[in-house]
């Protein structure tokens, strides 16, 4: 193993193809090379969903099923529930003592997210999200965090917090490095925004064949194409974006055929539907196995959480000692 990584998702809904392309696919590969910790971030989900905690409960197992059906191997990866590791909350509190409000306010990712969500004023928990994220990374001494370019400010802030802790007290924590990968953004079925649950433009990983077919049938295409022979602009068409993301033999020809008006949108959609269903089919098979054995899924979550908790307790023992808070 090349090191330890930590990554995961805020539990705000089940996962879709955008998540698969942007992170899950990569995690399935990374688990073979890195000791992998996967966090089901229910506490961080509260930063934006504190009024609907029941939604988090509903989706926790859905996301676990998404992980397992996408190919996360619970023998290799440790899947754990954030709120069941109280040491993460404790560490967040300690870090909060020396992180300034201004440094959080100026975090570009926080600024962008607050704008996107229309926050006039930021909740304390939302503003402190990078601090809590640092605790997620630091408690298990992760050496690497897989991120896209847009998440780099968060990691930079985490590195600063860890460095500051090590300077203030004792060097017991590990300064994480970003594992920068190309994190492709998948456009939604509307062709205007990235795929997102809240915009209703997503294809979920648990979709049936029929659901995929229906959604692709209704997907936006290049509006300039009325007839099959009309010259197309595949670069603005979400259907072509899916051809490209889920590449298969013939994907390149689609681009040319669309440009030359040699393929109809129905035929093109049929091909991409087939490709997406081919991708989802093994996931459906794995999902059924786990869905039919909910006890097994609970055991995976409990044993992953137990393992993460042991690591957290050991780190916290060192932290309390470093901070002279080991009273007895
Ligand atoms: S042929 Fe395919 S890529 Fe071209 S506009 Fe139609 S659906 Fe989009």
Image: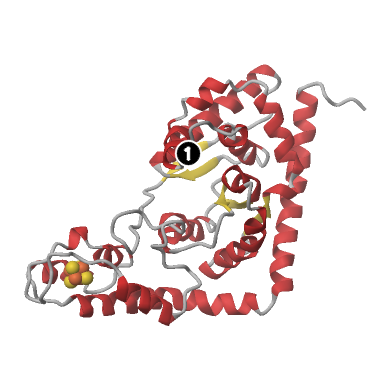
Q: Which corner quadrant of the image does residue 272 belong to?
A: bottom left
Which of the four quarters of the rendered structure image does ligand 1 lie in? bottom left
Q: Position of residue 91 (x, y in %)?
A: 71, 33
Q: Position of residue 190 (x, y in %)?
A: 31, 61
Q: Secondary structure at mark 1?
A: strand
Would you place residue 29 above or below residue 105 in this image?
below
Q: Position of residue 6 (x, y in %)?
A: 58, 47
Would you place residue 95 above or below residue 5 in this image?
above
Q: Is mark 1 within 8 Å of ligand 1?
A: no
In depth, the one of 253 and 133 nearer the eye is 133
Residue at figure coordinates x 68%, y 39% from the top left = 139
In depth, the one of 172 and 234 nearer the eye is 234
Residue at figure coordinates x 53%, y 41% from the top left = 144
Q: Which residue is mark 1?
A: 178
Residue at figure coordinates x 76%, y 42% from the top left = 86
Q: Position of residue 243 (x, y in %)?
A: 27, 68
Q: Is residue 221 left or right of residue 259?
A: right
Q: Is residue 311 left or right of residue 100?
A: right
Q: Quadrant of the C terminus?
A: top right
Residue at figure coordinates x 74%, y 42% from the top left = 312
In depth, the one of 234 and 158 nearer the eye is 234
Q: Does the rendering let one see residue 252?
A: no
């Amino acid at each position: 193993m090349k090191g330890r990584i930590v990554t995961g998702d805020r539990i705000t809904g089940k996962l879709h193809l955008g998540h698969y392309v942007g992170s899950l696919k990569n995690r399935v590969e990374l688990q073979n090379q890195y000791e992998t910790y996967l966090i089901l971030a229910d506490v961080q989900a509260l930063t934006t969903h504190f009024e609907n905690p029941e939604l988090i409960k509903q989706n926790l197992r859905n996301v676990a099923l998404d992980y397992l059906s996408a190919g996360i191997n619970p023998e290799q990866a440790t899947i754990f529930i954030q709120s069941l590791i109280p040491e993460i909350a404790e560490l967040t509190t300690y870090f909060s003592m020396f992180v300034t409000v201004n440094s959080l306010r100026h975090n570009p990712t926080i600024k962008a997210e607050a704008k996107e969500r229309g926050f006039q004023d930021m909740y304390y928990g939302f503003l402190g999200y990078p601090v809590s994220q640092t605790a997620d990374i630091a408690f298990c001494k992760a050496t690497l965090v897989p991120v896209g370019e847009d998440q780099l400010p968060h990691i930079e802030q985490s590195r600063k917090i860890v460095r500051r802790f090590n300077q203030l007290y004792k060097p017991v924590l590990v300064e994480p490095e970003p594992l920068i990968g190309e994190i492709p953004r998948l456009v939604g079925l509307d062709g205007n925004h990235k795929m997102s649950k809240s915009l209703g433009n997503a294809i979920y990983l648990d979709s049936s064949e029929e659901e995929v077919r229906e959604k692709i049938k209704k997907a936006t295409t290049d509006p300039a194409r009325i007839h099959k022979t009309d010259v197309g602009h595949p670069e603005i068409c979400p259907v072509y974006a899916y051809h490209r993301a889920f590449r298969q033999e013939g994907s390149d020809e689609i681009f040319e055929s669309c440009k030359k008006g040699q393929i109809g949108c129905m035929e093109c959609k049929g091909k991409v539907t087939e490709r997406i269903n081919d991708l989802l089919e093994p996931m459906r098979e794995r999902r059924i196995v786990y869905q039919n054995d909910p006890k097994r899924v609970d055991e995976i979550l409990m044993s992953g959480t137990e393992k993460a908790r042991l690591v957290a307790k050991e780190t916290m023992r060192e932290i309390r000692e470093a901070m002279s808070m080991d009273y007895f």
